[in-house]
Image (cartoon, helix red, strand yellow):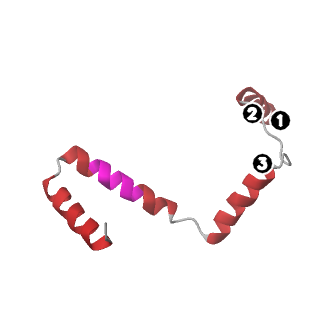
Amino acid sequence: MAPVEIRAQLHRYIDTADDTNLEAIYAILQGNQQAEKFSPEDLKEFYDRRAEYLEGNTPTYSVKEAHDLIRQSIKR
């Protein structure tokens, strides 16, 4: 389907949709805009960290281990 047809169908749907569906559509569109707020530098950092994790070059912690580390740092 061409983008022009998609826009037309969405407009027709929005004009007749109930409030719940409108809120759902809005939430989806807002979520998409949030994803676009990351800068190229941010994305590079995310991907670099992911690669380090996948290669096993970074430590990982269970939830219990993380809680213990946090508690230890608070006690200091």
Mark 2 neighbour class, 10 Å CA radius: few under 14, some 14 to 19, many 20 or more: few
Residue at horizontal 17 percent and vertical 47 percent from the top: 18
Residue at horizontal 79 percent and vertical 33 percent from the top: 69
Q: Disc 1 designates what residue?
A: 76
Q: Disc 3 designates what residue?
A: 54
- Dot in front, 1 or 2: 2
- Dot in front, 1 or 3: 3
Q: Position of residue 21 (x, y in %)?
A: 24, 47
Q: Main secondary structure of the magenta part?
A: helix
Displayed quadrant of residue 46 = bottom right
**Residue 29: assigned label:** none
Name the amino acid type tagged 1.
Arg
Q: Disc 2 designates what residue?
A: 66
Q: Position of residue 38 (x, y in %)?
A: 57, 65
SS of the residue under disc 3: helix
Mark 1 neighbour class, 10 Å CA radius: few under 14, some 14 to 19, many 20 or more: few
State yes or no: discs 1 and 2 in contact (Cβ < 8 Å).
no
